Image (tube, rainbow, N blue to C red):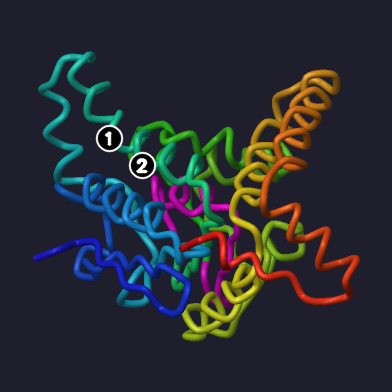
Amino acid sequence: MSIIEGQKINNTFFISINNPKSKNSMVLGFHPQLQSKINEAENSKDINSIIIFGEGGFFCAGGDLNSLKTRRDMTVPERLETLEQLNGTIKKIKECSKPTIAAVEGGAAGAGVSLAMACDFLIMSDKSFLSLAYVKIGLTPDGGVTKLLAEVLPKQILSELALIGDRIFAKKLFDLGFLNLISDAGEVKSDALKFSEKFKNLPQNAMFRIKTLIHHAYDNNFDEQMKLEANLMADSQGDKESMEGIDAFLEKRDPNFSKFRS
């Protein structure tokens, strides 16, 4: 049985984690299947955006504890090798050229938080939460989650999440400016699909360049970021997308970026 399923819905690629008995935890096969679906979406020219969703009322519970238990008998290099599977998934999402949306119903825990935070946009239901309860079982966070959260949360809130392991619910996260959208319980999937319509006729090359700028903005100094902006703007000015966009603006018509995707 496939743990990860994918389907095209209009111009959106909808990826569902479908292992609700384990709260969609990262069991054997999880990472290669998810990475394969992201590659499929990347290689589909008619796909404008990607949604990641957990079936059964929970987004993702993170690492499978039964699998984690077996790692105590491994050497450190062997453990690091297994952790690279998770890291590869997070990098795959972050480096994806197309906008990615995490649709969190119920909750995201452990590495499931990494999965959600690696996406460009985050939608949660008003009943859902994030949980980094590693400390409660004597573990430390992984999957880049402390970096991803530090980019958007004050140190005190990150400390509350990671050092105490308490859940933080969507309402508080929304008030902190953490979420793009807060939905009624049970409506996250449909709201995420509506949200994905925003990308219906936007230029894909330009969006990928903008994603690159956003990702580097948190680490580059001002001169480095300004140089990167200049390089990508120079590329954009010679792109067919900008030619269409500028001509459409001057001609007072809607641009047609979809013609460059065939």
Q: Amino acid at mark 2?
A: Thr
The percent position of residue 122, horizontal first and vertical second, equals 58, 61
Q: At x 19% / y 69%, what residue is drawn?
A: 21
Residue that badge 2 annotates: 89
Which disc number belongs to residue 124?
A: none
Instruction: Say left or right for 228 vs 262.
Output: right
Which disc number belongs to residue 85?
A: 1
Circle 2 — which element?
A: helix
Q: Nearer the viewer, residue 186 or 70?
A: 186
Q: Amino acid at mark 1?
A: Gln
Instruction: Say left or right for 208 vs 41.
Output: right
Which image quarter: residue 75? top left
Q: Give the number of callouts.
A: 2
Give the CA separation, mark 1 to mark 2.
6 Å
The percent position of residue 155, horizontal first and vertical second, equals 71, 36
Q: Nearer the viewer, residue 63 or 69?
A: 63
- Dot 1: within a 10 Å radius of its alpha carbon, few (fewer than 14), some, or many (20 or more) residues? some
The percent position of residue 59, horizontal first and vertical second, equals 39, 65
Q: At x 76% / y 64%, what residue is drawn?
A: 175
Which image quarter: residue 46? bottom left
Magenta residues? 108-128
- Dot 2: within a 10 Å radius of its alpha carbon, few (fewer than 14), some, or many (20 or more) residues? many
Q: At x 81% / y 68%, what residue is drawn?
A: 248
Q: At x 40% / y 47%, what residue is drawn?
A: 110
Where 89 sits versus 98, above or below?
above
State the quadrant of the N terminus: bottom left
Which image quarter: residue 204? bottom right
Circle 1 — which element?
A: helix
* Badge 1 vs badge 2, beta-carbon distance below 8 Å: yes
Q: Nearer the viewer, residue 173 or 246?
A: 246
